[in-house]
Amino acid sequence: MSGAFTKSMARNIFYGGTVFFFLLFLALSFDTHSQLPKRDMRQNITPQVAEGKKLWETHNCIGCHTLMGEGAYFAPELANVVVRYGEEGTKAFIKSRPKEGIEGRRSMPQFNFTDAQLDAIVAFLKHVNSINDANWPPNVQG
């Protein structure tokens, strides 16, 4: 074998590397897929939790808040809000928002949720808190 790097050698390295990294990608994808049921608590998703998620999405809560570190950083993290303030405290805060907002301050709008909708949102937030997120975000206050 000569000391020159040939086109054939480059092609073999390229194909070998492509196959190696494709197999690595498949193995890591399979591992992730097999780990999810153990971590995401999908067996705890009730119709009420699903309704809470729907309300979360339709009212664009993620546009201001973060959930498990994802979303906007305008308002507080909500993954652990029910643990910090309790179910009734969380519902009372959402209900108590002034209709016009607070002059000169950023403020959560009044959504006029029914009691059933508030229960669904709290159920969704409790479910999110039960997901194993490896203690993320690290700040308890969000």
Image (cartoon, grey):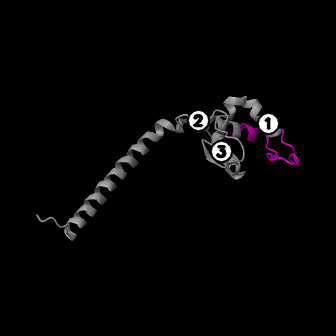
Q: Which residue is mark 2?
A: 138
Tag 2 and tag 3, C-beta contact below 8 Å: no
Q: Amino acid at mark 2?
A: Pro
Residue under pointer 3: 66
Q: Quadrant of the C terminus?
A: top right
Where residue 71 appears, as percent x and y from the top left, is 64, 49
Q: How many marks?
A: 3
Amino acid type at image mark 1: Phe
Marked residue nearer the N-terminal end (2 or 1): 1
Identify the residue position indicated by label 1 in the image.
93
Query: What kind of element bears circle 3?
Result: strand
Q: Would residue 115 appear left or right of 129 to someone viewing this image?
A: right
Q: Quadrant of residue 46?
A: top right
Q: Residue furthest bottom?
A: 7
- Give the residue displayed 79% in from the left and 41% down from the top: 114
Magenta part of the chain: 96-120
